[in-house]
Amino acid sequence: MGLFKKIAEALRKTKEAFSRKLDSLLSGGEINDDFYEELTDILVSSDVGFTTSEEIVERLRLYARKNKIRKAEEVKQALREILSEILQETEQVELKYPAIITIVGVNGVGKTTTIGKLANYFKSQKKDVTLVAGDTFRAAASEQLAEWANRNKVRIVKHAEGADAAAVVFDGISSAKARGTDVLIIDTAGRLQTKTNLMEELKKIDKVITREYPDANRYNFIVLDATTGQNALSQIEHFDEYMKLHGIILTKLDGTAKGGVVLSIAQDMNLPVVFIGTGETINDLEEFDAKEFVNNMF
């Protein structure tokens, strides 16, 4: 399946829900205050979030007035441009090497699988990759990550279950520096933001990386499950308190009609989506493209 088809398929449920409501609204005729009120409701129901929805509608209102928009297709095109602008207003992540990518997130969002897909992505870019099994809390987490390392034919640094996660990261960094590794991807324990001891562990890992490899390019990515919708925003807030986040990897997008949450993340959290999961296989991870995403929403 081609790249554009993968994104289209991942957004199929979002598009079905959003397009149906939007087309119904646009078939009503006049673009007036009632139209904008209903459009706000449609955006909120697509998990765009109330504040972001109001911002989008206000921009559309001004644009339509200035350009004397009346036709449905003109409204759609203007809306596409506004949504693309919002997604591109956040500071975009430019990957540089050597890179250290630390993956964080709550339990069950698919962090380990995402790391496997990331390793495959960087391997396809001809980069040398090493994985670090920093999740020493969950039983068999290291073994699961080792399976992904074997599938991708990349190195892995791991310790015994229950070991100090920061010590594993220290060894991973030492290995990466010695071998001239391009990309070091660090797994961390899935944790609820209320688990203070595990959240504090992130601070410790962060300090080790800063101290041991100051010349590396740092990227802290949070993995979010798209099906959680607006709950993703509180996860970002809590994790960002303990480890400065640089971007988002959105998983399970194909299983939800809540794709609009991406707009809330960009507008409210000022954090870019860097990758999106488009399916279950090792190749189903794509760089996020704002225009392509919006074009497939409706």
Image (cartoon, helix red, strand yellow):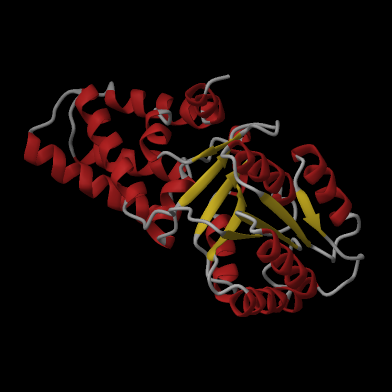
Query: Residue drawn 60% across and 43% down?
Result: 122
Query: Residue drawn 61% across and 80% down?
Result: 211
Front-most of 148 and 43?
Answer: 148
The N terminus, quarter of image: top right
Query: Residue drawn 32% across and 39% down?
Result: 39
Count the numbered circles shown. 0
Q: Give the percent coordinates (x, y) of residue 224.
A: 60, 51
Front-most of 175 and 247?
Answer: 175
Front-most of 42 and 52?
Answer: 52
216 displayed left or right of 52 = right
Q: Give the percent coordinates (x, y) of residue 73.
A: 23, 22
17 displayed left or right of 285 = left
The C terminus, quarter of image: top left
264 displayed left or right of 98 = left
Vertical relation: 243 (above or below) 74: below
Residue 226 visible, this angle:
no
Vertical relation: 284 (above or below) 245: above
Vertical relation: 167 (above or below) 230: below
Residue 113 visible, this angle:
yes
